[in-house]
Image (cartoon, rainbow, N blue to C red):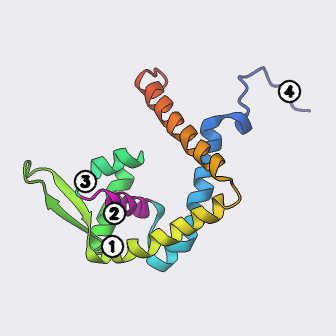
Amino acid sequence: MPPAMPDHAALELERFLPYRLSVLSNRISGAIAGAYSQRFDLTVTEWRVMAILGRAPDLSANQVAQRTAMDKVAVSRAVARLLESGRLLRSFDDDDRRRSVLRLSEAGYAVYDQIVPMALGFEQQLLGDMPAEQRELLFRLLDRLDELELRAEAGSSYA
């Protein structure tokens, strides 16, 4: 019979918000990625970079990393691969020649314009049975959680 374990801090993962959000995000991202990853030879990180630049062109890789809360190294690798595949263009900022900015190329927009409807269709399928007022509440709560997380991060001694 194994020895009794001393008391340890308890973490009920099923009720721990960071865990729940992470698992849900991974499952949803993986499901959407299934629709585009093989067809377009894209990773989730590469698609996120493209999605940001499709909405807000002329950002630096650091700005993309900040907007997506992704690791800078992962974003850098994705950017390198997208540049190599011809889906991104890099130019230099007019005000600061040391700062490069990224935008989708025509080839990038060709892929983007095919994936966006797929992603929106998946979202519609995912939220299909949810009444409009619950969807609105969900997005208000996500906005609020985003605010609270930024405040907690700014004042956190845990990070």
- The amino acid at mark 3 is Leu
* SS of the residue under disc 1: helix
- The amino acid at mark 1 is Tyr
Q: Residue at x 7, y 48 (%)?
A: 95
- The amino acid at mark 2 is Gly
Q: Residues within 10 Å of mark 4 (few under 14, many from 20)?
A: few
- Marks 4 and 3, Cα distance to the nearest angstrom? 57 Å
- Disc 2: which residue: 54
Q: Residues within 10 Å of mark 2 (few under 14, many from 20)?
A: some
Q: Earlier in the sequence, mark 2 or mark 4?
A: 4
| Closer to viewer: mark 2 or mark 4 | 2
* SS of the residue under disc 3: loop
- Marks 2 and 1, Cα distance to the nearest angstrom? 7 Å
Q: Are marks 2 and 1 in contact (CB under 8 Å)?
A: yes
Q: Give the overall secondary structure of the magenta segment.
A: helix
Whether residue 159 is visible to the viewer of this picture, yes or no, is no
* Picture disc at residue 3: 4
Q: Earlier in the sequence, mark 2 or mark 3?
A: 2
Q: Position of residue 115 (x, y in %)?
A: 46, 72
| Closer to viewer: mark 4 or mark 3 | 3
Q: Are marks 3 and 1 in contact (CB under 8 Å)?
A: no
Q: Camera-side residue: 109 or 130?
A: 130
The magenta stretch spans residue 53: yes
Q: Earlier in the sequence, mark 4 or mark 3?
A: 4
Q: Residues within 10 Å of mark 1 (few under 14, many from 20)?
A: some
- Marks 3 and 1, Cα distance to the nearest angstrom? 16 Å
